[in-house]
Amino acid sequence: MNLKHLFYFWKTAKEGGIMRAGEALHITPQTISGQIGQLEHSLGIELFSRQGRALELTDAGRLALGYADEIFSLGAELEQAIRHYPKERPQTFRVGVSDALPKSLAYRLLEPAVALGEPVRIVCREGRLERLLSELAVHRLDLVIADTPLPATLDVRAFNHRLAESGMSFVASPPLAARCKEVFPACLASLPLLVPGEDSSSRQKLMRWLEKARIRPKIVGEFDDSALMTAFGQAGVGVFPVPTIIEEEIVAAYGVQVLGRSPEARTEYFAISAERRVTHPCVLAIAESARTRFV
């Protein structure tokens, strides 16, 4: 679609006719009429219905006008933004974080983006992976961080970039840990357990590991939000799993104790981008840091 043709259509609709649009643009009505005709031909539908000398928008024309309003309004905003663009203005980095991802781990993965030499304004959105990927598909996000690669069932064009891999540590509040009378992992069968929500990749890895170890725990809570699970675990409601690579941080921050570790229950963490070859400096910094920090 030719934007020049769309502009003439938009101006005609706004001015209320071809004659007035021609006067506003200082071009002949014949030129405008010809440009609109080419636009209608390219779209395969009439945008105006001609009632004698008067023009009225068709249903398709009213739909096209709404989009044209947005297009040319954004164009005006773009021009103003570029004209007044300050050199010191920070670069915006929009990232989606799956709610299943532990917040401490999310920070460690994203930290290199805010440590760049140039100013960066990071905008974090948290939610379910499907919603975040839909935002990525329409370029409202630059990156999505998740504990699973792009699901094959989603019709979204995106690319996986593996960042890290970790086993699982099991931690508990000191009073709950004191109730542990057996060695790990057998003790998990006699203690209440908190687990991630059903959509979490780590939940699936955890349940397979428990089944293989023939442990039947008493699950007292499941959480889509890892921060909420941590809060319940800190309060002593149950033992809860955390990635081993952030075990020390969790212990220090929440005063919990480690009951044991499972290197077999491993979870991978991914950066998902709309581009195969990433170019955003923040994404490049995250990927480069992950290669050296999380080996």
Image: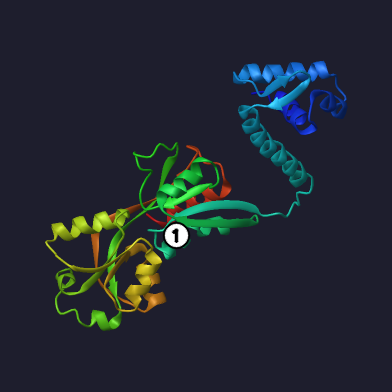
Quarter of the figure that contains the N terminus = top right
Quarter of the figure that contains the C terminus = bottom left
On screen, 24 above or below 40? below
What is the quadrant of residue 45 in the picture?
A: top right
Q: Residue at x 23, y 83 (%)?
A: 178
Percent x, y of residue 75? 72, 38
Q: Residue at x 86, y 29 (%)?
A: 24
Number of residues whose C-alpha sits closer than 10 Å to that of mark 1, classed few (under 14), some (14–19) or many (20 or more): some
Q: Is residue 223 toward the left or the right of residue 78 in the image? A: left
Q: Residue at x 14, y 57 (%)?
A: 212
Amino acid type for the residue under numbered disc 1: Ala
Q: Which residue is mark 1?
A: 106
Q: Is residue 37 toward the left or the right of residue 16 in the image? A: left
Q: Can residue 291 be seen from the camera position used here?
A: no
Furthest toward the front, the residue is 52
On screen, 226 above or below 45? below
Furthest toward the left, the residue is 214
What is the quadrant of residue 223 in the picture?
A: bottom left
Foreground residue among 23 and 138: 23
Q: Can residue 168 be seen from the camera position used here?
A: yes
Percent x, y of residue 144? 46, 49
Percent x, y of residue 243? 33, 62
Percent x, y of residue 18? 80, 23
Foreground residue among 46 and 270: 46
Q: Is residue 204 toward the left or the right of residue 213 in the image? A: right
